[in-house]
Image (cartoon, rainbow, N blue to C red):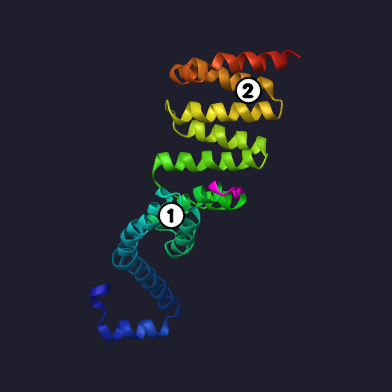
Amino acid sequence: MFENLSIDSLKESFKSNKKLKLITYIFGGAIMAVLLFFLYRQFFWKPSNEKSKDGYWLAQNYIAKDSTDKAIAVLVPFVKKYDGKSGGELGQYLLATQYMKKGEFKKALKNLEGVSVNDTYISIMCIGLQGDCKSELKKYKEAIDLYTQAADADDNDLTTPMYLFKAGGCAEQIKKFELATELYTRIKNDYPAFAGKKTIDKYISRVSSNKAK
């Protein structure tokens, strides 16, 4: 069929057939969009992303010197400029920690909620730090939810018992002693090294006696 069509007949068919013209425009537009996306990733996003990874070192230097205000002054425009890039996301995480040092937990929480990274440890810490902010704001129930989420995000002997312990402390604050007992007992049974350091039996005994009242 198509071998019998001349170039001129194809041109004429394209001019007269509005449906064919529309399909061609859509298909061509889709190809162009994909092409532009790959060009953007290759020539604009990748160099910018690599540059963003280097950019937060100045703020790191201020943080190391405990110059919180200077670190924030550097990080605020940096995060805005490199939002969505690897360095920008790490910068936003650092910015949140500096707001926490100043006791500005609402600002810290807003930044932590916006962080998106592939690193498992930083992702867990972001959730856990949100729990810290909620706890400092005395929103203990929300803090418990975040701490348990952080604890279960990746089962390990470091962050899991640490956040279970923090969740237990918040449960005590709102007199959920049964929940606190469950959390502390889980630490005792599953993470004995951490339990030993925290003398977890003391906490279990305390919440158990409160639960009995």
The N terminus lies in quadrant: bottom left
Q: Nearer the viewer, residue 70 or 156?
A: 70
Residue 174 is labelled as none
**Where on the picture, by quarter, is residue 213?**
top right
**Image location of residue 84, percent across then percent down:** 43, 58
Q: Which residue is mark 2?
A: 180
Q: Give the answer, above or below, for where 43 lies relative to 116.
A: below
* Extreme residue toward the right, this view: 213
Q: Quadrant of residue 149?
A: top right
Residue at screen point 37% across, 57% down: 58
Main SS category, magenta section:
loop
Label tally: 2
Residue type (three-letter) at the residue carrying disc 1: Gly
Q: Is residue 98 left or right of residue 176?
A: left
* Residue at x 49%, y 43% (from the top left corner): 126
Say above or below: 182 vs 42. Answer: above
Check the image and report above or below for 17 versus 70: below
Label 2 crowd (10 A; few <14 / some 14-19 / many >=20): many
Say which element carries label 1.
Answer: helix
**Left or right: where 153 falls relative to 12:** right
Q: Is residue 204 left or right of residue 122?
A: right
Q: CA distance from mark 1 to mark 2?
A: 35 Å
Position above or below: 145 against 179: below
Q: Earlier in the sequence, mark 1 or mark 2?
A: 1
Q: Which residues are magenta?
A: 101-105
**Hey, what amino acid is under mark 2?**
Ala
202 displayed left or right of 159 = right
Residue tagged 1? 91
Callout 2: helix, strand or loop? helix
Look at 63% across and 38% down and name the residue there. Answer: 135
Asked whether 28 falls inside the magenta stretch, the response is no
